[in-house]
Image (spheres, helix red, strand yellow):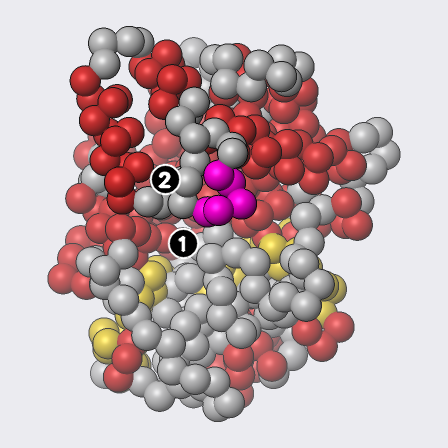
Amino acid sequence: MFKAPQERRELRTFLGKTNLPAISRLLTAFSITASFFPENSNLTYADLGRINAEKIMNGSAAFTAPGNQTMDNLIHLKDGQIVGDWRDSTYGIGGGRIPYDVNTALVPAALRAIASLARAGFFPTHPEWNLTADTYAQVWEDNTLQFFEVNITTAQATTLLSTYVNSSSFYGSDQSDTLDSDVVFHALSLDGNNNQSQVQVMNTDDCFRHFLLNTTNQTQLTSFINSTANNVRRTFPAGLMTDVGMLISNPAYGPSPVYAANWTTSAYHGTVVWSWPLAMMSRGLELQLSRCSSTSAPDFCSDSTVFNNVKNAYNILWDSIDANSAHLTTEVWSWTYSGGKFNYIDYGALPPPPGQSPTESDIVQLWSLTFLAVTRNEGFA
């Protein structure tokens, strides 16, 4: 929020020197008038925070009304825009208008944050938010996953994997013999290009929900965390795992050839590895497993099959992270396949997909340094 260097320094100085309790310090700091955008010159940071929260509350309200849990009331990209979440490249979310991560994780997480801030006195003009925002969040947590869920039988998955290998440039095994259950994942987005109602690309964006939310719909949580674990531990193209790390996208289960063409090893948000999703997924799974030691442990904790599956996936992911420690401060990297294994290659060494411009990978980003703070929990080894 604080983009002007002088303002950041002043706020750090104020927050560091004052002896007021933390909440009081923040409330006082937020009374400072903003100055880095001329149009905000008469607004305090508290005003800007309130305006942002009002936008979230207003934009999420329709979905929460009785009988209004429909696709039309989900959060859509603005007209004329092709990107709207972190997968901000041409085919990042397949032209979809309704992003998976935004609707199933970021909206309810923002609502939970608004409720918490309201209880701490941050929104004096909206005291009702301490309850309303939590109520909204519960509806979004419980009723959004269903729109994105993709279920593929083992027989269907086997056919799709064979088709993918035959139509792509991947020369390894299709890994269909490793499928020990039906394949379940959540589409990258809805209302995609070429009349795709769901953009059926397996992906890592489950990590947002595991990291940001502690959901309480037990049946849904058990199924969701189990499908995440299956997709993390299975080797590509059956799942997301490779020798060079967990891929952020897997188009192998897409119902048309355009999937293999658009999500490739040279596409910025294709079959590539990004550092920060490795950290968010590993930390998210850890947070969910840690709930099992609480007095209100989720139901999946007492389901030995699911619990062990999640713990196994957590350790497979960390084994991969440790094996690729040399690359973790890189934003994104890719791979080639030879000698029966996936081999690391610098993302910039590959030509861009046809019709696309090269996208630069940049190490100078804070999200590429998350492993300074995220470490393996040996208690789940």
Residue 245, placed above or below residue 63: below
Q: In this orientation, which residue lies closer to the viewer: 75 or 141? A: 75
Left or right: residue 94 versus residue 373 is right
Q: In this orientation, which residue lies closer to the viewer: 248 or 331? A: 331
Residue 161, placed above or below residue 217: below
Q: Is residue 38 magenta?
A: yes
Q: Quadrant of the N terminus?
A: top left
Question: Element under label 2?
Answer: loop
What residue lies at 84% left-to-right and 29% top-to-bottom?
Answer: 66
Q: Position of residue 228 (x, y in %)?
A: 47, 48
What residue lies at 48% left-to-right and 39% top-to-bottom?
Answer: 41
Q: Residue furthest bottom?
A: 354
Q: Main secondary structure of the magenta part?
A: helix
- The answer to whether the residue labelled 1 contacts the one labelled 2, judged by CB atoms less than 8 Å apart, is no
Q: In this orientation, which residue lies closer to the viewer: 16 or 280? A: 16
Looking at numbered disc 1 in the image, what kind of residue is underneath it? Val
Query: Start and end of the magenta stretch?
Result: 37-41
Which residue is the site of mark 1? 232
Looking at numbered disc 2 in the image, what kind of residue is underneath it? Phe
Which residue is the site of mark 2? 2
Tell me the distance, in whole angstroms, between the alpha carbons under discs 1 and 2.
Answer: 36 Å
Q: Position of residue 85 (x, y in %)?
A: 52, 56
Q: Position of residue 190 (x, y in %)?
A: 68, 59
Residue 87, placed above or below residue 265: above
Q: Is residue 76 magenta?
A: no
